[in-house]
Image (cartoon, coloured by chain):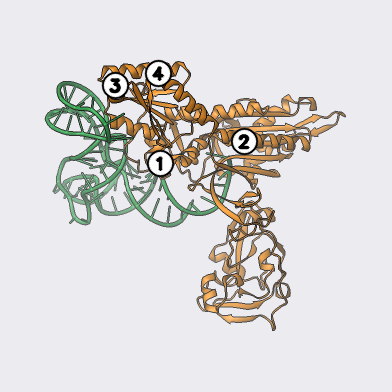
Chain colours: A orange, B green
Amino acid sequence: MRYSRLLIPTLKETPAEAEATSHILLFRAGMIRKLASGIYDYLPLGLRVLRKVEQIVREEMNRAGAQEVLLPAVQPAELWQESGRWQVYGKELLRFKDRHGRDCCFGPTHEEVITDVVRREVHSYRQLPLNLYQIQVKFRDEIRPRFGLIRGREFIMKDAYSFDVDEAGAELTYGSMYEAYSRIFRRCGLTFKAVEADTGPIGGSFSHEFMVLADTGEDLLASCNSCNYAANLEKAEVPPPEDNPGPPPAGSSKLVATPGVRTVEEVAAFLKVQPRDIVKTLIYETDQDPVAVLIRGDHEVNEIKVRNLLGVTDLILAGPAKVKELTGAEVGFSGPLGLSIPIYADQAVAALSAMVIGANKDDHHFTGVHPQRDLQITRVADLRQVTEQDPCPRCGAALTLLKGIEVGHIFKLGLKYSKALAAKVLDDEGEEQFIFMGCYGIGVSRIVAAAIEQGHDTDGIIWPMALAPFQVGLVPINMNDQTTRETAARLHDELEAAGIEVLLDDRDERPGVKFKDMDLLGLPLRVVVGPKTLAAGQAEVRHRRTQNLTLVELDRIFPYIKDLIVQEFHD
RNA sequence: CGGGACGUGGCUCAGCCUGGUAGAGCACAGCGUUCGGGACGCUGGGGUCGGAGGUUCAAAUCCUCUCGUCCCGACCA
């Protein structure tokens, strides 16, 4: 392919609106442009990368026995009302009416549609297991799109849905998807980690996320240094503390004046105690009744755990007015003593023997409080976030916290959608059975961004061989030199004929411009043809990632490059 | 939805405070020179200053409203 014939609008300067590395580089390399917040155009080079990812995903899904389909992006509200998600999904679901006034939405995910297909077309256990997938545009009206392709509103997703007769079958399918996903991300040249995850609003019983490790990641994950335990921070378990609370301290708890002392740090300094001896009382409003959550001063609450424990969908920290109404005191002096709302305590709180709590009275705290003697706790549970100080919940070794970009998520759905939409088959005894489902997503366009977050330097993108828009960039130094021009053209034709994807920079530009652009585009290999080396019958091959420079005889260029490409694909 | 920043040729920005009728660099077109890490000269095209309203003899500049964008916190592939 010739550079001069492709639309590759590279930019010297960083657009003001881009912040994340992948966003900046995709933009500068002329691969994407923005149409609106979270909505992007894919230009020729960006599309080539996207297609590479899609093809890898397609091959591995097919290999795992899944079948490709294409479902509609626009969906009738009826299906969503039937599953109950029309009410539950929130504003992220883009809703609109057609000309007849019928409610519609633009699909953010396709459980409803696929389950509808299966309930109409599949009636016997003999037709199962079935795994259907598609690669398609999704729309989610995100609160805050950011980082370019990492969190767009419109994006390309591969979503697969599996249907099995029984739970054992569903687990086998889940396992095969786990394997397929691992192969996909490995083939994409990504450094990733599979972690246990919360199931969120999609629902279901069990799930893993696939995280690309990158400092710019939006997710935190906890990973064991010894065993293979790894979990999203929102899911990561804290093992129960070993020590039981000691006996109550001598004497009863004491009310002490703490004028203007509100935060954990202030209380610790004022009373000369450690933050771990202080207990924070957090008042939450929920879609049901308000609750209080007790967390040790040196810990952070994990709202996902609280939400799951309470079985609520909304969980919002109460404002000053609500706190005053429920506790009788300003924020900063809330405490569990004498509260009339349910009290949920983190397990570390229940293991304290003498704690400091707010007194529900302005400018006062209690000291010497014992959980069993003095408090009426509704329930003790694991409600906090893990820290790097916590031991692994499986093996007890140390944990490391890492940042990651979620590129894939697999769920065991169970019967949630098959029951809601009545998707049933007859089993081998002629009995009606609900179908066991699983769903499996990959952020295809997000992978493109994640690969850049992992592969770049100050000069630009460094694509993995498998995703590069072209494998080789061919740079003739001076288009006015006939030998240079003709040699480059010949090399280009030879490589292309051999099935190697090569981009010939045939522009009448100075060498510096071509080099800068090539580095920015991030093609793995660069071949430079110029009068200097040509005189010796050679051309120069440069490896983008290692910056290795090699002079190669012209007639050996083809095998040399072919070897390098094969080698990279296997790395 | 809260908190912050911003909107001036395609891109990066100056001008705004202290109103006087729009600039620079890059990019683009033509000609010439140049050619191994974002060359140079000459010439040229391109902007209702996000939009609406107001103040004023006069608004990019002051006031009000509005739309949009980006960044930080609650959602997700």
- Residue A552 numbered mark, or none: none
Give the spatial CA distance, label 4 vs label 1.
32 Å
Using the image, determine if residue A210 lies above or below residue A377.
Answer: above
Tag 4 residue = A555
Q: Give me the chain letter of mark 4.
A: A
Give the spatial CA distance, label 1 vs label 2.
27 Å
Give the spatial CA distance, label 3 vs label 1.
33 Å
Of the residues shown, which amino acid type is indicated by label 1?
A: Asp
The answer as to whether the residues below labels 1 and 2 share one chain is yes
Give the spatial CA distance, label 3 vs label 2.
49 Å
The answer as to whether the residues below labels 4 and 1 share one chain is yes
Crowding near pointer 3: few (<14 within 10 Å), some, many (20+)? few
Query: Are circles 4 and 2 on residues that touch, CB within 8 Å?
Result: no
The answer as to whether the residues below labels 4 and 2 share one chain is yes
Of the residues shown, which amino acid type is indicated by label 3?
A: Ala
Tag 2 residue = A181
Marks 3, 2: nearer the viewer: 3
Tell me the SS state at disc 3.
Answer: loop
- Residue A457 numbered mark, or none: 1
Query: Are circles 1 and 2 on residues that touch, CB within 8 Å?
Result: no
Tell which circle, 1 or 2, labels the residue nearer the N-terminal end: 2
